[in-house]
Image (spheres, rainbow, N blue to C red):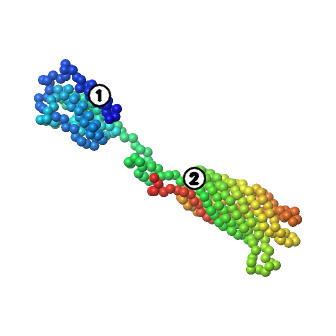
């Protein structure tokens, strides 16, 4: 039994169980009829032990008020407890009278009994108690999910701020080659409201030998380029699920291949810093998968070197157009626990 129940028992015992004969109500003031106490089992949330303790205390208070309790029960006193407003709603019925009281906890129930018994014997009227207003829960914009507490509503998980993506398309060093060949771009993005950080790598193989022509004509100009970049991305419509974006950043790249350097074909190579600019579009930014399209320009800040002659060749921008998908792990609001 908890300390609250022990305090309730002590209150009953000290207030009514130890009342001296001089203080007790004289026999002539007692009810002429024989009464009994009936405790109804109701939705009070009390255990049988708690209910027995309260009944014993109530009977002690009734006897202290001079009412004779007898098994004959000509005048039943019916007590009903209900759990309301975070406390106990107490209803006492005797004959044609019905009185009510409300107490926030068990420790204050004896005081409520005293008021009810006094009002019933003396004929006083008791005001109907006002229950405390229930606090309104803030609205939750999420699908209801049963939690550990009955009726608890849990928020659906927020989509993660990161995203992985893979895009493929065409790219070319437009100032040196006429052909555009496959370019692959793979990367990672971490987004905030308006801005995102983009880390990625790309590979381009532009041009190549044609196996259908004769040996003497198989030498064609070709360049391969690989680079890694770190860029800042700005979303133009951050509140929408689809948005255009602009991207600018720096990278480090390497280009090598074969060019027609007079008087014959020879290898060239170069590496160094690069400036990256891009304009793109993405949709379904809050979902697991999204579509992406990006038009990009990479400007190398270095020249190509011709090892045989020691000359350099200026390399122009690498232009690319890629499309692909982005992915991130989003837990379903209907399945998460």
Left or right: 311 in relation to 295: right
Crowd tier of the residue under label 2, counting other residues whose Cα lies within 10 Å: few below 14, some 14–19, many 20 or above: some
- Name the spot of residue 101 as percent of width and height, x first: 27, 34
- Name the spot of residue 120 as percent of width and height, x first: 19, 31
Helix or strand or loop: what does disc 2 sit on?
Answer: loop
Q: Which residue carries the number 2 mark?
A: 161
- Name the spot of residue 135 as percent of width and height, x first: 39, 41
- Residue located 59% across and 56% down the image: 163
Left or right: 75 in relation to 199: left
Does 47 appear above or below 178? above
Q: Which of the labelled discs sits on residue 74, or is there none?
A: none
- Residue located 68% across and 59% down the image: 201
Helix or strand or loop: what does disc 1 sit on?
Answer: helix
Does 109 appear above or below 147? above
**Residue nearest the observer in this picture, 274 or 35:** 35
Crowd tier of the residue under label 1, counting other residues whose Cα lies within 10 Å: few below 14, some 14–19, many 20 or above: some
Residue 321 visible: no
Quarter of the image holding residue 65? top left
Q: Which of the labelled discs sits on residue 10, or is there none?
A: 1
- Name the spot of residue 3 as percent of width and height, x first: 34, 32
Whole-Å distance between the Cαs marked 2 and 1?
Answer: 60 Å
The nearer-to-camera label among 2 and 1 is: 1
Left or right: 197 in relation to 67: right
Mark 2 or mark 1, which has the lower sequence index?
1
């Amino acid at each position: 039994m908890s300390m609250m129940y022990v305090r309730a028992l002590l209150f009953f015992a000290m207030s009514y169980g130890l009342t001296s004969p001089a203080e007790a109500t004289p026999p002539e003031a007692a009810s002429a009829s024989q009464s009994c106490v009936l405790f109804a089992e109701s939705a009070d949330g009390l255990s049988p032990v708690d209910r027995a303790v309260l009944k014993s205390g109530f009977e002690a208070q009734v006897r202290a008020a001079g009412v004779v309790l007898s098994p004959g029960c000509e005048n039943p006193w019916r007590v009903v407890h209900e759990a309301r407003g975070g406390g106990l709603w107490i209803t006492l019925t005797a004959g044609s009278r019905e009185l009510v009281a409300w107490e926030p906890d068990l420790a204050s129930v004896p005081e409520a009994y005293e008021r009810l018994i006094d009002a019933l014997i003396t004929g006083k009227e008791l005001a109907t108690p006002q229950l405390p207003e229930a606090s309104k829960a803030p609205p939750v914009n999420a699908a209801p999910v049963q939690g550990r507490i009955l009726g608890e509503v849990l928020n659906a998980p927020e989509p993660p701020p990161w995203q992985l993506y893979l895009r493929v398309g065409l790219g070319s060093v437009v100032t040196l080659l006429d052909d555009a060949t496959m370019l692959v771009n793979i990367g990672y993005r971490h987004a905030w409201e308006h801005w995102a950080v983009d880390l990625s790598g790309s590979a381009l193989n532009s041009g190549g030998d044609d196996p259908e022509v004769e040996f003497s004509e198989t030498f064609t100009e070709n360049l391969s380029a690989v680079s890694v970049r770190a860029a800042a991305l700005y979303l133009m419509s951050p509140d929408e699920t689809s948005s255009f974006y602009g991207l600018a950043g720096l990278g480090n790249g390497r280009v090598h291949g074969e060019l027609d350097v007079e008087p014959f074909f020879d290898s060239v190579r170069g590496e160094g810093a690069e400036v990256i600019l891009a304009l793109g579009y993405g949709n379904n930014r809050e979902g697991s998968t999204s579509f992406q399209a990006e038009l990009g320009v990479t400007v190398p800040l270095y020249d190509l070197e011709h090892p045989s002659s020691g000359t350099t060749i200026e390399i122009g921008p690498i232009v690319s157009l890629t499309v692909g998908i982005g992915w991130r792990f989003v837990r379903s609001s209907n399945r998460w626990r």
